[in-house]
Image: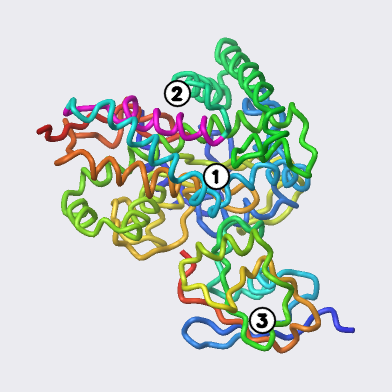
Amino acid sequence: MSDSVPVTFVLADGERREVDAKVGESVMLAARSSDVPGIVATCGGSAMCATCHVYVAEPYAGGLPPVEPEEDGLLSFTVAERKANSRLSCQVVVTAELSGAEIHIPDAQV
Amino acid sequence: MADPFAVYEELLSLGRVVWFPALDRYCVTRYDDIIELEKNTEQFSVADLTSPTVRALGESILSKDGENHRRERASCEPALRPKVVVDDWAPTFQRNTDAIIDAFASRGSAEVDHDFGSKIASRNIADMLGFRGVSEDTMLRWSRAIVGGCGNYARDGEVFEACDVARREIDEAIAEVADDLRRAPDASIISAMVNTEGNISIEEMGRNASVIIGGGINEPNHAISTAVLGLLSNPEQLAQVLEDDSDQVWKRVFEETMRWIAPLGITLRKTLHAGEFAGVHLDEGVNLCGLLAGANRDGERHEDADKFIVNRPAKPHLGFGSGPHLCLGMWVARVSVGQIAVPTLFRRLPNLRLTEPVSMVGDDWTNWMFRGLSRLEVEWDVA
């Protein structure tokens, strides 16, 4: 089994960035370690700042573990519109199931 | 007192990591590097047992790294998450704000720090902690004693003694409410601490409640007077804000306030091992200082960075710091100051204006680390 899986970040302007995301790390860290812009993550991953908002494209969003109450509460405070597939990327752990996923970055985090 | 922003600008022009003799530290001047400084806890530590903060507060969340810090901080977080702040605390903040304005509204003039900002912040934090019986004056005395102790680089014995007295009284106040909150938990911070799964000792609670009383009163108070100054010094922007009067525009006012004059100006770290950082080699045990307030004025990041501009493009700033030590009260401040205290003041006091011109330097400004006005005279029309 591979230690990393390919995921594609789609920036707000439509640019696509395919990165190797390390299994076990958060999607936020996967984006940051590949210098994918548009994810601010001011708090560094403790679910306090709501600035690492992403939209996970289906069918991958439905396959993720459910949103926990803390993440749910913060998702009401994102700057870009909350949608059914909104997640905080610091709370989504990369797994083998995420291989090939398309993750859209909203046009604003602050 | 000299203008810290002129010094920040010079340090920024000299490089990314600049030796600053007055602080006996290397200053980290740029946004991206400060983010790394605060995030990279493998290389940079907040634990400095020789600092006045540790003498003043003991080893609190301010001076712990890693898992210990995480556990203690997490014990407070349930009371400070935005949904709890908006759903459970905003009505209390609004009630407190109105009551404090009621006391002086008919007077036609006030001093913002004394009559408004310090009282609002004291009452709000007392209520959030669960200290209903503690007066605003007592909260303010505690807060000033703690902030004084943390900044007591001169090691003045009386300053530390005042801090010790405040901490004993805070411990007593916690002991008074702890049993009740164990039996009947509520939305308060002490309730979150005593009912956490993280098993927090009574000593840890006292130290961290002291951190919250120190920063949770001083910084919101400064943010209030800075926001009032920013708006009253820019009448065209004020008119536009009052015309709009939406949550969105007040949010922009508040974020710009925090960028313009960050209430906590600097953040301190020490290297845990030798290594490369921001293009330089640093030995082990080197003292560093992230210039939060300076990086917020970086002209390459923010156009006309020295000016208060409500409508500037939204961009991340370091007014709350970042990383694991990101201001624990960020959402409380955004709501209690940004959405309630400042808007309510302008809505209730017609034609609010400065009584006299305010200089951006001088004795009315507090020190560099905790930057804000200690005196801001305003007046308004009384029917």
Query: What residue occupies the far top of the structure in this picture?
Result: B158
Label 2 to label 3, Cα distance in Å?
48 Å
Which residues make up the magenta segment?
B108-128
Element class at badge 2:
helix
Instruction: Inspect the magenta stretch and tell me whether residue B126 lies in it.
Output: yes
The residue to which callout 1 is attached is B27
- For disc 2, the neighbor class at 10 Å (few under 14, some 14 to 19, many from 20) is some
Query: What residue occupies the far left of the structure in this picture?
Result: B383
**Discs 1, 2: same chain:** yes
Q: Position of residue B65 (x, y in %)?
A: 73, 44
User: Mostly what secondary structure, the magenta segment?
Assistant: helix
Up the image or down, B180 lies above or below B89; here it is: above
- For disc 3, the neighbor class at 10 Å (few under 14, some 14 to 19, many from 20) is some
Query: Residue at horizontal 65%, vertical 33%?
Result: B208
Q: Amino acid at mark 3?
A: Ala
Q: Nearer the viewer, mark 1 or mark 3?
A: 3
Q: Amino acid at mark 2?
A: Glu
Residue B201 sits in quarter? top right
Residue B180 sits in quarter? top right
Label 1 to label 3, Cα distance in Å?
43 Å
Q: Amino acid at mark 1?
A: Cys
Could you tell me if the residues under marks 1 and 3 are in contact, i.e. CB atoms within 8 Å? no
The residue to which callout 2 is attached is B136
Viewed as shown, does residue B324 lie left or right of B377?
Answer: right
The residue to which callout 3 is attached is A61
